[in-house]
Image: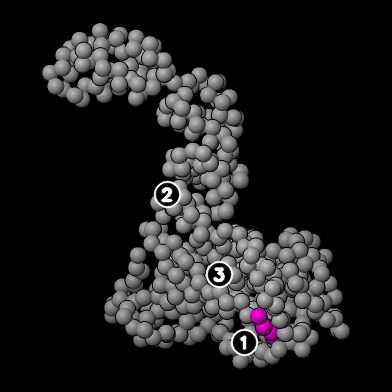
Amino acid sequence: MSYIIKGETGDWEVVIGLEVHAQVTSKAKLFSGAPTEFGAEPNTQVSFVDAAMPGMLPVLNEYAVEQAVKTGLGLKAKVNRNSVFARKNYFYADLPFGYQISQFDQPIVGEGTIVLDMPDGTSRAVGVERLHLEQDAGKLVHDMHATKSFVDLNRAGVPLMEIVSKPDMRSPEEAGAYLRKLRAILRYLGTCDGNMEEGSMRCDANVSVRPVGSKELRTRCEIKNVNSVRFVMQAIDHEARRHVEVYEGGGKIDQETRLYDPGQNETRAMRSKEMAHDYRYFPDPDLLPVELTEEFVAQIAKNLPELPDDKKARFEKEYGLTAYDADVLVSEKENALFFEEVAKGRDPKQAANWVITNLFGVLNKKGVGITESPVSAKNLGRLIDLIADNTISGRQAKEAFEAMVETGKDTDAIVAEKGLKQITDTGAIAAAVDQVLAANADKVAQFKAGKEQVLGWFVGQVMKASQGKANPAMCNELLRKKLAQ
Ligand code: MN
């Protein structure tokens, strides 16, 4: 699926790199014991360290280090046994220290890979440049007073993992797939909740364009803090087209930081982009270099959960699912768990079909996730069992499913309530068949004269006579038998 911008002077392609700030799932901050809970009263989760009181010293949160290593391993990346915290110096009201404690030339995690699963079933690997640990800044509140701004330091010092990709993506779709995959990996690992609305996962996109066929890297612009996957994709598309327009108009692109406005679907210049040397990075003298033992890393590696790519491969192999179905099921850990519970001891393809087509259809319509599903895995499994043992037909199962979605009741209760038992009693079906054949001698003659299609019509009549409860396969079989006599 290629993304080409048709310009007046020729075809252009886009070059995209993403920087994701993922908040580490940690109860404490990166360098203090203050809590990190979202939505607390302003300035109630601030230690003296977070407020940069004189003489306060940062103490590294070991749990956050563990989560960064775990994430590095999940990204199949090189974990650096030696890393260094550095001061990134800049002045802003939400940054009490006057610098951010981050990592610079010696990050905790080096190069890794994220495999993108595209909607057409193909896969693509995107390089991860690095992952480093750093502290978050506070928040400025501008809407509480007409002429004053306020500072909330609750977020100051919250541990972040900054995950930087290589400029390997070539379309907004690939950028979207990258973010979804990264979010899935983080959630599987439990190292970040991936919630973009609450800001626990934030994305900056670096965008440039070049003529198709060229290998040059032109000046890029960075679009800051876009808060949904869809907006990131829109912002990139918009920004790439802006670049093409500027180049074709004979202009040049300035390296700058831009803001995306989803309402207007446009990006606006925010400030000219700082270069690394503007930040005067240097190793933080308050913190020792981080040295990880081999055992520390090995212990974390040993306890890694099964990740989306491995789960997808297993679903394809073990359950015989298509790459597409397996991908849909593993995209969220909870979906995969739900599916496996339904599939256990049953036909996996049928289970996948019910979960993906029927259940996800309903959940999408309601706008809720699987954890809020009105139909439990147990009840969906039971429904599939009732189809498998011929208690109900496929059509009756759909009817039961709809009622289960509406009422949240158990499968058996719904089936009993609606009288949805399929008639599998040969005698009863045979009686209905006889009746239909006797009443339609003309159609019987047509069948015997070679008009095979009449059989379908007969099945319909018998089903109708049984109020839809007869087993269609049995109707078919009995009709053939009787018509052959
Ligand atoms: Mn950062």
Viewer-proximal residue, 331 or 240? 331
In which quadrant of the rendered view does residue 404 lie? top right
Q: Residue furthest right?
A: 55
Q: Which part of the image, by quadrant, shows the C terminus? A: top left
Residue at mark 2 to residue at mark 1: CA–CA distance: 44 Å
Helix or strand or loop: what does disc 3 sit on? loop
First reached walking from the N terminus: tag 3 or tag 2: 3
Q: Indicate yes or no whether the magenta region holds residue 153.
A: no
Tell me the kind of residue under disc 2.
Leu
In which quadrant of the rendered view does residue 416 lie? top right
The disc at residue 105 is: 1
- The correct choice, above or below, for 471 with respect to 330 in the image is above
- The correct choice, above or below, for 224 with respect to 323 in the image is below
Q: Which part of the image, by quadrant, shows the N terminus? A: bottom left
Query: Percent position (x, y) of residue 328?
Result: 47, 52
What residue is drawn where x is 35% and y is 17%? 464
**Residue pointed to by mark 2:** 321
- The correct choice, above or below, for 183 with respect to 281 in the image is above
Q: Confirm whether residue 225 shows in the render.
A: no
The disc at residue 75 is: 3
What residue is drawn where x is 73% and y is 65%? 26
- The correct choice, above or below, for 238 with respect to 291 in the image is above
Residue at mark 3 to residue at mark 1: CA–CA distance: 20 Å
What residue is drawn where x is 55% and y is 20%? 417
- What's the magenta region? 81-86
Name the front one of labels 2 and 1.
2
- Proximity of marks 3 and 1: CB atoms separated by less than 8 Å: no
Name the front one of labels 3 and 1.
3
Viewer-proximal residue, 279 or 311? 311
What residue is drawn where x is 62% and y is 87%? 105
